Amino acid sequence: MKDCKEMSTPMNQKEKLCKNDGAEKVEEIYFKGLVGCLMYLTATRPDILYVISILSSDWAGSADEMKSTPGYYFSLGSGMFLWCSKKQDTTAQFTKEAEFMATTTAVNQALWLRKIFVDLHMNQTKGIEVFVDNQFAIAISHNLVFHGKKHFNIKLLFLREVQKNGDVILLCCKTEEQLADIFTKPLLGNKFQLLKQKIGV
């Protein structure tokens, strides 16, 4: 490793990976093995989760699909115990739709955790707080107006229902305070190091 160049972040902020970039092709099994080893590391190194999710999407599928990569994490007390970064299955037509879909994914995970807590006899006295850095996602979940896309309306009804039941509480979080950004995008060195420290890595 003596000739390696040290980097302050796992991915260059301006780096754009694409399927046909002119680079020499590598043997698929070798690539999958390397990515698998890196995926194993994310169990204790969530700070590399975003770049690993980029490398492992469809086992190096095209990055030209214009699909967002949302991320979330859950903490209990002062410790983070569950995290995720995964490319969305559906291509959003606009940024707000992508944010709304990401919020729905996190809320689904929160409901699953709520059921696990009940099984562990840790009944919740109030809804699980989900911090979202997009006010549109919160506002539209309270809006009674339906939108054109069927899958969007289903998610809309779902978010309204879980909030009405009190299972989940959506709260607004300033973008600069959103720790989950470390799971969703390449960051500048100082921002990456700050978030890495805040999530306890």
Image (cartoon, rainbow, N blue to C red):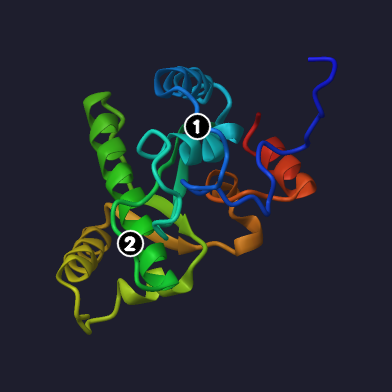
Residue pointed to by mark 1 = 25
Q: Earlier along the polypeptide chain: callout 2 or callout 1?
A: 1
- Residue count near mark 1 (Cα–Cα under 10 Å), binned few <14, some 14–19, many ≥20: few
Residue 73 visible somewhere in the drawing:
yes
Work out which quarter of the rendered image holds the C terminus and state it. Answer: top right
- Give the structural element (helix, strand or loop) at label 2: loop
Amino acid type of disc 1?
A: Lys
Q: In which quarter of the image is residue 125?
A: top left
- Give the structural element (helix, strand or loop) at label 1: loop
Q: In which quarter of the image is residue 137?
A: bottom left
Residue 36, percent across and down? 44, 20
Would residue 98 be found to the left or right of residue 15 on screen? Answer: left
Q: Do the residues labelled 2 and 1 touch (CB within 8 Å)?
A: no
Amino acid type of disc 2?
A: Thr
Mark 2–mark 1 distance (CA, rounded to whole Å): 27 Å
- Residue count near mark 2 (Cα–Cα under 10 Å), binned few <14, some 14–19, many ≥20: few
State the residue at coordinates (31%, 43%). 109
Residue pointed to by mark 2 = 91
Residue 138, percent across and down? 39, 69
**Vertical placement of residue 181 versus 115, above or below:** below
State the residue at coordinates (30%, 75%). 142
Residue 122, percent across and down? 31, 30
Kindly give the residue lying farthest to the bottom in the view shown.
Answer: 145
Work out which quarter of the rendered image holds the N terminus and state it. Answer: top right
Of the pair 106 and 121, the residue shown nearer to us: 106
Of the pair 183 and 156, the residue shown nearer to us: 183
Q: Quadrant of residue 168?
A: bottom left
Residue 78 visible somewhere in the drawing:
no
